[in-house]
Amino acid sequence: MTTDDTGRPLRVAIGEDDVLLREGVARILTDAGLDVVARSGDADDLLQRALAYRPDVVITDVQMPPRRADDGLRTAMELRRRSPRIGVLILSQFCEPAYVMDLIGDRPEGVGYLLKERVGDVTTFVDAIRRVAAGGSALDPEVVVRMLGRHTRAGPLQQLTPRELAVLAAMAEGLSNSGVAESLLISHASVEKHVTAIFRKLRITPTDSEHRRVQAVLTYLRADTRRR
């Protein structure tokens, strides 16, 4: 069962206008031990329900009624402004780094962005929700790669080797050193060496906190985007 620090199931609200997908996600999360406290197919309604029920995490699509534009994203951003303790996880079919940067804003805590295809990997999906609920970050690997790719033509990231870029991408996904080692099929010692080099080249103060590592990466990417 997925619980918070008090031992109660994590409470989740879902925003998705596709009824079958919305109910499917709700079923997956319920079976995984989470408490789905609200479901909505409209962004405005989702905002009201989230503010009323105060879930640990709100999961929402980007494009939703009433305007069927970026209403879901705007709702997520408004929730982060009005209720910072609620984590938000965008579940989208679009691999769009700009949405990620808009969502992060000036506060990378408690935020996630996954492609809808990741829902099929229940363990990864639930782990992302858990990390966001705990105030961490969860970014889709494909989005991370695109974010990094846009920053390799110039600036400090061009100093990194291809392996260091791969490690940085894994770090931005929220993986621990052990997770990075397993993902890239390299030794734990090699990961530590690459992480040290990355922090040195990007002038980011090293830290033992996995959450702060992700914050450092996202903060750097956001700052570099604004300079362009």
Image (cartoon, rainbow, N blue to C red):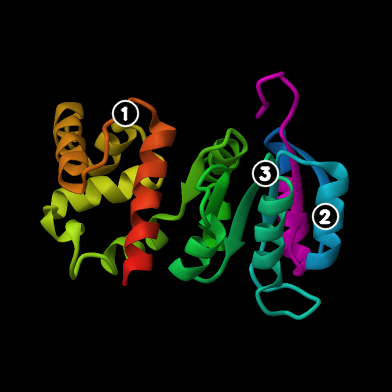
The residue identified by callout 1 is: 207
The first of marks 2 and 1 along the sequence is: 2
Residue at left 14%, top 55%?
Answer: 162
Q: CA distance from mark 3 to mark 1?
A: 24 Å
Identity, as a three-letter code, of the amino acid under mark 3: Pro
The first of marks 3 and 2 along the sequence is: 2
Neighbor class of circle 2 (other Cα within 10 Å; few <14, some 14-19, many 20+) is many
The image quadrant where one finds the N terminus is: top right
Neighbor class of circle 3 (other Cα within 10 Å; few <14, some 14-19, many 20+) is some
The residue identified by callout 2 is: 39
Q: CA distance from mark 3 to mark 2?
A: 20 Å
Q: Nearer the viewer, mark 3 or mark 2?
A: 3
Identity, as a three-letter code, of the amino acid under mark 1: Thr
The residue identified by callout 3 is: 84
Horizontal side of residue 86 vs 155, given as left or right: right
Give x and y (percent) for residue 80.
66, 51
Range shown magenta: 1-28
Label 1 residue SS = loop
Residue at left 69%, top 43%?
Answer: 86
Which of the pair 107/11 is nearer the observer?
107
